[in-house]
Image (cartoon, helix red, strand yellow):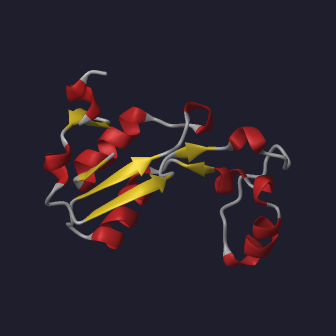
Amino acid sequence: MDQSRSTCIMTVHGERHPEDFKNHSFILPHEHLIQNLSRYFVGEANAIEQIELKNYSKIKESPYINLSNLALNDLEEICTELKLAFGSSKGLIVESTNLESGRDISKLQQVCLETKIYF
């Protein structure tokens, strides 16, 4: 095994060494920040209503009936939530979404640049 590769962390911006993260505040080991599960949609063709308090119980009971519930892909919202949760802290998030579920490296790169959190 190539020893140099065994001590690297692959990020959306390429290989990094573990010591690059020694001053980071947190590591989240299994997250899904950008995801598209619309292939599991079982609702009506026009069921794109926003999730609100009035329909929350119904969606909670049957999560695949609402397209809005099946996609996490709003970059502005993702960045806002990460900034609210972590402020200006630096961190590393292991993005576990697979390709079939909508992993999008270019979007993760954008989020990384905006939030200073590595993926």
Determine the residue positioned at 50% across, 45% down: 96
- Residue 29 in the figure: left or right of residue 38: left
Quadrant in the picture for the C terminus: top left
Q: Nearer the viewer, residue 36 or 74?
A: 36
Rendered view: 94 above or below 6: below
Rendered view: 49 above or below 58: above
Q: Position of residue 38 (x, y in %)?
A: 70, 42
Q: Quadrant of residue 45?
A: top right
Q: Quadrant of residue 49?
A: bottom right
Rendered view: 20 above or below 61: above
Rendered view: 95 above or below 51: above
The residue positioned farthest toward the top in the image shown? 2
Q: Position of residue 29 (x, y in %)?
A: 42, 55
Quadrant in the picture for the N terminus: top left
Q: Quadrant of residue 85?
A: bottom left
Q: Nearer the viewer, residue 29 or 57?
A: 29
Determine the residue positioned at 26% across, 21% down: 2
The residue positioned farthest toward the bottom in the image shown? 53
